[in-house]
Amino acid sequence: ETSRIAQPIGTALDRFIKNHQDQFAFASGELSQLLRDIALASKVVNREVNKAGLIDIMGAAGSTNNTGDQQQKLDVLANIRFTRALMKGGEVCALVSEESESYVDLNNEGKYVIAIDPLDGSSNIDVNVSIGTIFSIYRRKSIAGMPIQEEDILQKGSDQVAAGYILYGSSTMLVYTTGHGVNGFTYEPSLGEYFLSHPDMQMPADGKIYSINEGSANSFEKPVKDYIQHCKDNNYTARYIGSLVADFHRNLLKGGIYIYPATAKDPQGKLRLMYECNALAFIAEQAGGKASSGKARILDLEPRHLHERTPFYVGSKNMVTKAESF
Ligand code: AHG
Ligand code: MN
Ligand code: MN
Ligand code: MN
């Protein structure tokens, strides 16, 4: 398989993308450019995240998004940054975002559709805890130049051609897959570049970390309660940051399971299929992990609308399988 050519640690993202161009669907260079656009926008967001306390971009924006979340100033700002970068880039015809009620038309000649959570972990912005960005990339089904169709937008996760996330953490990282394994890059701020730091990431098949907001446990269904009891009976470690990207990233490296189940407040779970779950499910599977709604494979779910939610179980393969068995 040509897909896993070893690349030395320290390879710059641009060079890595160039060296792997043959893996990209339709190898025309457009998907490569799209990934570069995302990387560039993430550097701008990273800069703003890093000095958020100094430039009056903390706190609420005073508005609510389509899924009922209070928008933070950085939610709005990150949405603008990514939208603008993708609009200028020209490869994307339509953008689905947590912060936009319906999809946004970009360049109708573009061949790709993107779904994005511009800023994940909003509640952690003001307290200087890790936050992220999540993205899914699809090839459009209709012919470029034609009007966008519903089938272009509502694609299932298994149709993703690439997906990734940026973690604005103790260091900033970009982790992505094009369906040939998962690679992680660390941002070097003084050089303004991402460099390969985590080649061919593999999620341990087993783990001892469970991540769930147990505050809502009274309204969990019995199987979820039983699985949590199983974790406790086995002396697992509880870790919950409250930023999906950061919780997922930790479990990807160390082994673990992340669960956002149905609750009384959110009967379908809180997380959104199109711009949160699908990308992480694709990355998990590419790293040897697993992602489930508790009943079905996440990547097989057919989205019915942009902001659809699903219960989400993601992480080490054997842990997710075990949780499903309950
Ligand atoms: P977002 O900030 O993009 O709206 O996502 C918030 C999500 C996710 O990041 C996190 O894991 C989850 O909400 C936390 O929810 P609870 O506070 O209900 O645990
Ligand atoms: Mn939100
Ligand atoms: Mn989110
Ligand atoms: Mn968000």
Image (tube, rainbow, N blue to C red):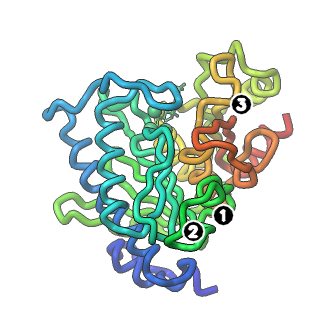
Residue at image position (81%, 41%) is 295
Q: Are marks 1 and 3 in contact (CB under 8 Å)?
A: no
Taking the image as shown, residue 323 lies to the left or right of residue 168, namely right
For mark 3, give the secondary structure.
helix
Where is residue 254 drawn, in percent x and y? 56, 49
Q: Tag 3 or tag 2, which sits nearer the N-term?
A: 2
Q: Quadrant location of residue 91?
A: bottom left
Local crowd size for mark 3, using a 10 Å CA cut-off: few (<14), some (14–19), many (≥20): some
Compare residues 33 and 262 and report the one nearer the observer. Answer: 33
Of tags 2 and 3, the one toward the viewer is 2
Q: Which mark is residue 231?
A: 3
* Residue type, label 1: Asp
State the CA–CA distance, disc 2 to disc 1. 8 Å
Q: Are marks 2 and 3 in contact (CB under 8 Å)?
A: no
Q: Which amino acid lies under the numbered mark 2 shown in the image of this protein?
A: Arg
Q: Which mark is residue 159?
A: 1
Mark 1 or mark 3: which comes first in sequence? 1
Asked whether, in this view, residue 217 is left or right of residue 10, the answer is: right
Q: Residue 181 location in percent, x, y?
A: 58, 69
Toward the left, the furthest residue is 54
In this view, the residue farthest toward the front is 147
Q: Are the two marked residues, 2 and 1, in contact with CB atoms closer than 8 angstroms?
A: yes
Instruction: Give the class, few, some or many, for how many residues have Cα within 10 Å of label 2's Cα (few <14, many ≥20).
Output: many
